[in-house]
Image (cartoon, coloured by chain):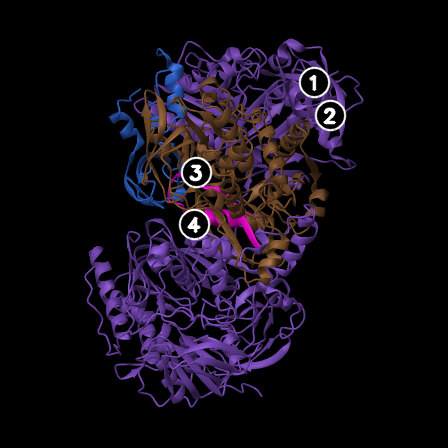
Chain colours: A blue, B brown, C purple
Amino acid sequence: MLIPHPLLGPRDSQEFTYLGDARLIDRPDGLAEGALDLFHDYLYLRDNPAGLHQELWFHEQGDRSWLVVTRDTRTHEIVGAELASDVARARGRSK
Amino acid sequence: MRYSGFKVLKEALTGHKGWRPAWRDPEPKAHYDIVIVGGGGHGLATAYYLAKVFSQSSVAVIEKGWIGGGNVGRNTTIIRSNYLLDGNEPFYEFSMKLWEGLEQDFNFNAMVSQRGVLNLSHTDSQRDAFRRRGNAMRLNGVDAELLDTEGVRRIAPFLNFDSARFPIKGGLLQPRGGTVRHDAVAWGYARGADSRGVDIIQNCEVTGFRIENGQCRGVETTRGFIGAGKVGVAVAGSSGQVMAKAGLRLPIESHVLQAFVSEGLKPLLPGVITYGAGHFYVSQSDKGGLVFGGDIDGYNSYAQRGNLPVVEDVCEGGMSLMPMIGRARLLRMWGGIMDMSMDGSPIIDHTDIGGLYFNGGWCYGGFKATPASGWCFAHLLATDRPHDTATAYRFDRFRKGLMIDEKGVGAQPNLH
Amino acid sequence: MSQSHRIEGGLIDRTRRLDFRFDGKSYQGHPGDTLASALMANGVRLMGRSFKYHRPRGPLTAGSEEPNALVELRSGARQEPNTRATVAELYDGLDARSQNRIGALSFDLLAVNDLMSPFLAAGFYYKTFMWPKAFWEKLYEPMIRRAAGLGSLSRETDPDLYDKGFLHCDLLVIGGGPAGLAAALTAGRAGADVILADEDFLIGGRLNAETLTLGDTSGAVWAKASAAELASLPNVRLMPRTTVIGAFDHGIHGALERNADHLPSPAAGKPRQTLWRIYAKRSLLCAGATERPIAFRNNDRPGILLGAALRSYANRWAAVPAQEVAIFTNNDDGHRTAADLLAKGVRVAAVIDSRSDAPKTGGYEVLAGAVVTDAAGRLGLKSVTVKLANGETKTIPCQLLAVSGGWNPNVHLTCHQRGRPVWDAALSSFVPGGVLSPGLSVAGAAQGHMSTAACLRSGAEAAVAALSDLGITAHSADLPEAEDAPYRITPLYHVPGKGRAWLDQQNDVTVKDVKLAHQEGYVSVEHLKRYTTLGMATDQGKTANLGGLAVMAEMTGKSIPETGTTIFRPPYTPVPIAAFAGRSSGKDFRPTRLTPSHHWAARQGAVFVEVGMWMRAQWFPRPGETQWRQSVDREVLATRNSVGICDVTTLGKIDVQGSEAAEFLNRIYANAFAKLPVGKVRYGLMLREDGMVMDDGTTARLAEDHFVMTTTTANAVGVYRHMEFCRQCLWPDLDVQIISTTEAWAQYSVAGPNARRLLQKIVDPAHDLSNEAFPYMGCAEITVCGGLRARLFRISFSGELAYEIAVPTRYGDALMQRLVEAGAEFDAVVYGTEALGVMRIEKGHAAGNELNGTTTALNLGMGGMVSKKKDSIGSTLSEREGLKRADALVLVGFRPVNPAESFTAGSHFIAREAEANAANDQGYMTSVCFSPSLGHIIGLGFLKNGAARKGEVLRAVNPVQDVETLVEVVSPHFIDPEGERVRA
């Protein structure tokens, strides 16, 4: 596969290491009420869609960016890739 | 109709006119006591044992395509019960014992061939881990032999002992491990279930579950609504998709695992051999093809096909382990979709919806589990209690911190 | 009798003679021949035996789709089973043998299976061999295995090299026939980057096998000229002998180039084959079409082959092993064969055309509305039986029968991404259809264009369209005038009748087998395939699948497309496993990482061990030491008594900087890090989010905003990845930057009571190493050896007074030598990983065997380290009930009750009086060594509720080695439990 790196252009997926669903960005607050249940859902449950899937790839053999790649799990077609840090900020993460 | 050498002889002499369909092609009825969703190995085995062991007379298996078309027909045919953890080992040994009597039980030659499964170790700590695992197997009453380099050489003198990047230090052998003709397992269970009254309904896709007041009443399908007292879902690979129709999220991701077969070769390999320093395992089929595989591609996929990097990785492993196979040609590669669970172990459990039961999360180890999975799922469906060997396969184990993680890689499905 | 059946013409070089052997007999051929064509030229039709019934077989085809003519090529370690004689290029000295036989090819003892065939119908083995149970493995299966298989491997290591390469292009043209050439010319002349790959060694496809004219010249000449033009274009890469084996995601294609298979052996240092990964912006499939046979009784006799194949043998190779040829066809193609043969002076006995309206224009007998019903000649065709239109039967003597059942477009690559071909009624075949992979288009016969003119046109047009997608303007190449005859076919897949009519010749699947599958309910095409093995042979059923489908369609009363489609999987043709591995085998399977002191250590005679990709010195034997324990014990004792040096460069090193670096570390470590003072090192316990220990190590604070972390060797990569995840995905605005510096620093441990004195000789005098100035867990940036920048950490894995000193990697080798020189007066030793391991077990430090991914801080006896005051990775889920059970495993020490006894890691703990079974399992031993300091074996292990069981005696059982030892539970800190030495 070719990953369209937002900074570096198309790169072979072999340069990357895959993690999984980009929802792993949405880490709950460990000090919040009911954190155990929140973390259970966060870490263990997946939508696992047959279709577009936002997922985390790490450019391990490259610039060490984490990317959020949007890919169709039925055809492997990739419709977009963004820096995970941008996505994280857009989802309200900061410090 | 009973299959036997005598029957084959008789039919041969009378023009094979007496053979009948191995299973019927019935129209779905309006209601069954138990509906199994998924006509793969596990679903068919569940139906078979429901009818045979648990005396259930109103059972249907519904399958969106043709039976045996999923992973039971796409795997590398290995059976073994060489597990480490308490939650797993008794279950897989139960499965192994069922394999050992299966053909006589369901009257279909599935070519259960116990020629041994040899896992190789290449470091001291790997050897220590194998010793721990072998001892765990023995404490569970399972056969296991710890081999040193010479012991491995006696079994497989053709391995690379001289110029290996990761020298072979030993191995863990389960002599009773081996291979089974995978399609025959699906067909044997189907035929056995059908002859005991189970309706096997092909080309019937589940489009939804009818759930009323938290209770599952049946399934909506492309061939209409089928009512059910209980519904058991055994659709590994598509678990997430099917259970989403009931509004459930699972601790499972779908990943593609590729498998490979070479052209036919005269007998070469003694049994199953698994490389410990690369992703490669291999056996030789009765037809002579080397059947081999390695790691999953590593990204979520429903595509039933993979990509070159893993093909190359697997062949690199093969060549570094047994350089004699270099001029054998890879004939065909294909992919299956795995239910990769969060700890690498399966789930056989009821759901929060009454009457809806789930069997899945088999990762790439589902084939060897087929008989026990069927039996245990049948047990759960028939009695509402887990079978003794499957008590750990619960949904809530992640919530409770009771993971069954053989590899110790944690909640990352593509590493299991 | 040499080349007795060589006729005039052909694209062979008659000026040179090549000698070769088949089954020990010598023959001659010419450059340009394949093994099959050369054998045909020598009158040889029998080349192999079938898989199941061991039927005598000759070539059915002249290409890579060949099911029958499989041979073992070459000998010794280069022996290559199942090679298709139809594509094996002839070279001088070629040696091949027929395979899958016992005895001579003409008298194979296993042909007895053929007589037994009524008992061996499709799937017979599923119904028998079940009694008695034990006989399957002991008798039936070995018997089946011996009879099955095809060729054999040499069992030796393949001596040849295999390479891999990567190519990029605008347009990949797959296939160099008329469509492919027209496409490549169009794109090449437009200046696009073009790759044209063809599996044949001669570019041109069917143009080389037909007598058609293109413009004012022959097809072969036009192909040659076109190939020459393409070769002259700098933007075109012409790749003959290159099979595109698979179409993968995003325009990536796999291709196998056979660099040296046409030579007796590859030139020294040159590869035999190259596996290319071709990254194509657009690809154009011009793979042509494959002719299919018509099944009838005994249609597998040697000498019965496909019509187009016979034209190839006659026109391209000038080889026709027959005096009389008959032709059986359901379309106009059979008449083309007749015309060509007549023109070559070959006698055409008759054209048996199943169509009642067969054309009768040529100078040969046409039997319209007739079919072939049987063939005679077990080892070579002698005659065929024909059922005439009027119902009468006629026997026609002939030595060859050319069968034309119509053409199947080569859709294979369009299926590799699970595209589904669609039915084309006019062709009576499947053509590419549905949704093709992005970037892939199809032209020529592969798309169902059956005339030369149409192929040329579609190739050029498809190239223009593909390039237009890329913004490149191209104009269709000037195309020569070519035949544009309509394709007229009346489908006929098999001739009904008695006896066995062969569909899949290699796997011996007959029409009857398909009928039996139907009768038994194996109706789905996938069931059919699996039950009968149709299409599962080395040719993937290229000539067989449609026939099988057609028979099943007849049985079910459905149309062929309703019955199913056949899809194909990569590779297009089989590929040697070695080619996929390339150079990554043997010692080069994976890269090898060497530490800075590696070469020095090698000179000292160190024994090395693989640690991940690293090679590390395991111990350093000295003269007189004959057994590894002697060396290791000496290294341990010398270190504990004086001083030892060890290369610990392999530890992961991560530089963490930024104003919020401390906060970052505080979140990724379970224990507190926010308040670590500058100049101090702290042990850090890193958890995964699920609460399991991910890694441990030390982190030093060199400045307010600068930390240096170490990780274990094994987890260096994973920890760094995890930290980047936390930094980029969880806290993107935290002011922290991290980078791996594992390769940047050489690091040595200097341990033992004399460690300080030794280091004082190296460290520049400005730096005070006294215990007061530089206490335990201190760190500093210093200089050594007169100004070389270095880092010094006072940390200890051994339990001794110890330091780790780091210098830039390029000074690592020199520093090791300097340390050894400086240590001479203390009798310093250099120790390897074994001594390192012994000392850490003696000290009770957890390492890889303990950090196995299923252990929590609690298991390691460090539960108290997980801070409850902060939200760090893993802190929440480590609170789950199952991880905090009262009987949780805890790491403790073990020693044998009888010090003379031994035990091993991997033993399980069982209470003294209890039965050794899983229910009574109390835990397991993780690490064991002989402690030279204590004089007996010691171990670490996880024991249920272990912390409360000190003093208890248990059995360490090891049933796989039939050993059992009484052990006492002790503290894991065997040496200096108070930690006085490290603070000395």
To the question of a shared chain for discs 3 and 4, the answer is yes
Which quarter of the image is occupied by the N terminus of chain C? bottom right
Report in which chain the residue with disc 2 lies. C
- The magenta stretch is B289-317
What x and y, as percent, mark residue C960?
Answer: 71, 32
Give the label on residue C903, or none. Answer: 2
Q: Is residue B157 above or below residue B348?
A: below
Percent x, y of residue C959: 72, 29
Is the residue at mark 3 from the same chain as the one at mark 2? no
Reading the chain from its start, which is encountered first: label 1 or label 2? 1
Quadrant housing residue C412 = bottom left
Q: Which mark is residue C894?
A: 1
For the residue labelled by badge 2, is the local secondary structure a helix, a strand or a loop? loop
Viewer-nearest of discs 1 and 3 = 3
- SS for callout 3: strand
Q: Is residue C383 magenta?
A: no
Amino acid type of the residue that numbered disc 3 sits on in the rendered structure: Val
Amino acid residing under circle 2: Phe
Contact, CB < 8 Å: mark 1 with mark 2?
Answer: yes
- In this orientation, does residue C574 appear? no
Q: Amino acid at mark 1?
A: Phe
Discs 1 and 2 carry the same chain letter = yes
